[in-house]
Amino acid sequence: MNKEKMVQKLKEKISEKRYEHSIGVSYTAACMAMVYGADIEAARTAGLLHDCAKGLSSKEKLEKARKYGLPVNKYEESHPEMLHAKLGAYFARYKFDITDEDILNAITYHTTGRPNMSLLEKIVFVADYIEPNRRPVKDMDEIRQEAFTDLDKCIVHILKNTIEYLETSMDDMDYMTKMTYDYYLNK
Ligand code: FE
Ligand code: FE
């Protein structure tokens, strides 16, 4: 599928604001790919499509994940919003004709990360957090610099702040977020 058609299709699925965010992630990921020597086109595409399932309601997310036979864990059952990552990869494959497994994995793991991520997975995970439309959260200036200077350090920083935030808001978290943090902290 060419980029024009992809963009047109994506715009039908997500809000204007979410689309702006997706463009932000797309270009941020492309810039990071330039710095780290990843595939720039793959980074653009993964960034563009990473939230393509986000427009569905929570109910639809759960229903569709079950219908498509995607694994739904306990955390996702109580936080169906999280399923937009796995569903996004499913849509990318079957509605946007993406066959590159690295792009599909980058979409699947963009919210939690995972231990031993590929370069592209790391880039999309970080780009989603730092893209310019994002509201500045704690340490954002520092995290944005680390994104272009020390990728693993940046990932630990993002996860540390995310986990801290979830702990103070008394919310639980996906076990994968903690697993990713432990992995990159001890690496
Ligand atoms: Fe997302
Ligand atoms: Fe996003």
Image (cartoon, rainbow, N blue to C red):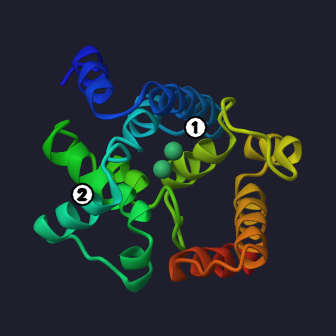
Locate residue 105: give its quadrant: bottom left
Location of residue 149 in the rendering, given as x and y in whole percent from the top left corner: 79, 44
Check if mark 2's residue and mark 1's residue have beta carbons within 8 Å.
Answer: no
Element at label 1: loop
Location of residue 43 in the rendering, given as x and y in whole percent from the top left corner: 46, 36
Asked if 86 appears above or below 16 in the picture, the reply is below
Q: Is residue 163 left or right of residue 139?
A: left
Q: Nearer the viewer, residue 172 or 142?
A: 172
Residue positioned 14% across, 71% down in the render? 69
Residue 157 is marked as none
Q: Given the image, on which type of amino acid does mark 2 rest?
A: Glu
Mark 1 is surrounded, within 10 Å at the Cα level, by few (under 14), some (14 to 19) or many (20 or more) other residues, namely few
Q: Is residue 26 left or right of residue 157?
A: left
| Residue assigned mark 1 | 37
Location of residue 11 in the rendering, given as x and y in whole percent from the top left corner: 32, 24
Asked if 65 appears above or below 76 in the picture, the reply is above
Residue positioned 78% across, 73% down in the render? 164
Between the residue at mark 2 and the residue at mark 1, the CA separation in whole angstroms equals: 38 Å
Residue positioned 36% across, 63% down in the render? 83
| Residue assigned mark 2 | 60
Q: Nearer the viewer, residue 14 or 44?
A: 14
Farthest residue, direction top: 4
Location of residue 59 in the rendering, given as x and y in whole percent from the top left corner: 28, 62
Q: Nearer the viewer, residue 23 or 126?
A: 23
Asked if 74 appears above or below 34 in the picture, the reply is below
Work out which quarter of the rendered image holds the C terminus and state it: bottom right
